[in-house]
Image (cartoon, grey):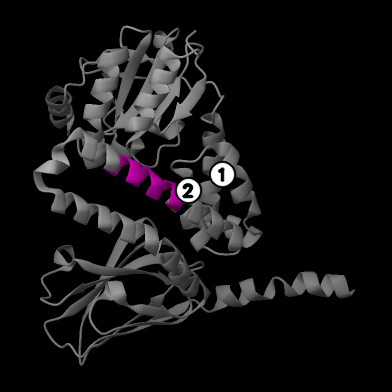
Amino acid sequence: MKKLFLSAAAFIPAILFAQDTKYTIQGNIGTLNKPAKVYLQYRKDGKTVSDSVTLKDGKFAFKGDAGATPTSARLWFNPKASGMGAAEDSHSIYLEPGVITVTTTDLLAHAKVDGPKTNQENELYRAALKPVDDGYDALDAKEKAAGEAAKSEEFKKGIRKEEKALTNQWNGINKQFIKDHPDSYISLTALQSYAYSADYADIAPLYESLTPVIKESVAGKKFGDLMPKLKAVALGATAPEFAEADTAGKMMSLSSFRGKYVLIDFWASWCGPCRAENPNVVKAYNQYKDKNFTIVGVSLDKPTAKKAWLEAIHKDGLTWTQLSDLKFWDSKAAAMYAVKGIPQNFLIDPNGKIIAKNLRGDDLNDKLAQLFNGSLVQ
């Protein structure tokens, strides 16, 4: 009987949570007045919702319905009230039942946020990631201070090494946060970030460690639906077959490249990091194209952007096969490979097995050198 009572009691918080979904945001930014504005933006039912309020003696407030589960949102501050798009200062929060307080003397980025469980956990998560954010800021400052020296290959190599260390630190923080907070919606955010560069073997146990409440949420179910696709492109799996049109409109299949090492490179003309990485990919292609290696580019360009896609190919010197269905994030190939961010790539061997992924910068060069200058050539 006691066991039954405890089981039933475990559901009480969820029931109460579902009954009261009203939120209140109480904010304070110094003593500012009109025209200074704070903007609130979030997604609801597949649509972007925006609201704004003018500061009075530094105070602002928003009220609304948080929905069944906490919703990721962002507050933007613009002292000139010239629109959210012109605001440079912001802070992430979560809309959830209860009172959320946001207090700062100057910038939202420096604000102290308090409130219900998810917002407290979000602040813990932000604090955990702060050393990484500070590290990237320091790298930006280092590049600016270097001036012309920043263009040297030696300097760039050093920056890439530091960036890799920060990425590894970022992944470690996300992984640890998920382990420490299996009953947090923030852990889903951390898992999505971690999944970008991790393999299925590392992602699966973290997802399984989440509590049923988190996994059964809308975001939890969405990530759960992604798990089979992540498994399908795990290291050692046979790369899923796909076919898309090349620049001339001819359908090309992945299997037509069987027998070679193939780098499937997901990118787009509008993607700044992709374009910045392209010179490195060009260098790798030119060095190994005569050693049973090729690249298949898959662009996530928009339906109306074929011209921009072709111009980017020409400008960046991408002389290998380029494919695209021009469906932006609805790209069929990207969906098959669980691509949620670009640039992203998968290296497959002559038998079609995935042997590496997310190879960028020196990692791509090192892997190909290992394959073609070492003992792994087939």
Q: Main secondary structure of the magenta part?
A: helix
Which numbered disc, 2 or 1, marks the residue that appears first in the sequence? Answer: 2
Numbered tag placed on residue 203 in the rendering: 1
Q: What residue sits 30% from the left and 23% below the top?
A: 297
Q: Is residue 206 above or below residue 95?
A: above
Separation (CA) of disc 2 from disc 1: 8 Å
Q: What residue sits 22% from the left and 81% below the top?
A: 106
Name the spot of residue 159 as percent of width and height, x first: 27, 43
- Circles 2 and 1: CB distance less than 8 Å? yes
Image quarter where the N terminus lies is bottom right
Closer to the camera, 50 or 209? Answer: 209
Task: Indicate the amino acid at tag 1.
Answer: Ile
Q: Outermost residue toward the right?
A: 1
Numbered tag placed on residue 194 in the rendering: 2
Q: Secondary structure at mark 1?
A: helix
Q: Residues within 10 Å of mark 1 (few under 14, many from 20)?
A: many
What segment is highlighted magenta in the picture?
Answer: 159-169
Q: Is residue 162 magenta?
A: yes
Name the spot of residue 3 as percent of width and height, x first: 86, 70
80 on left or right of 366 = left
Name the spot of residue 328 as percent of width and height, x first: 29, 37
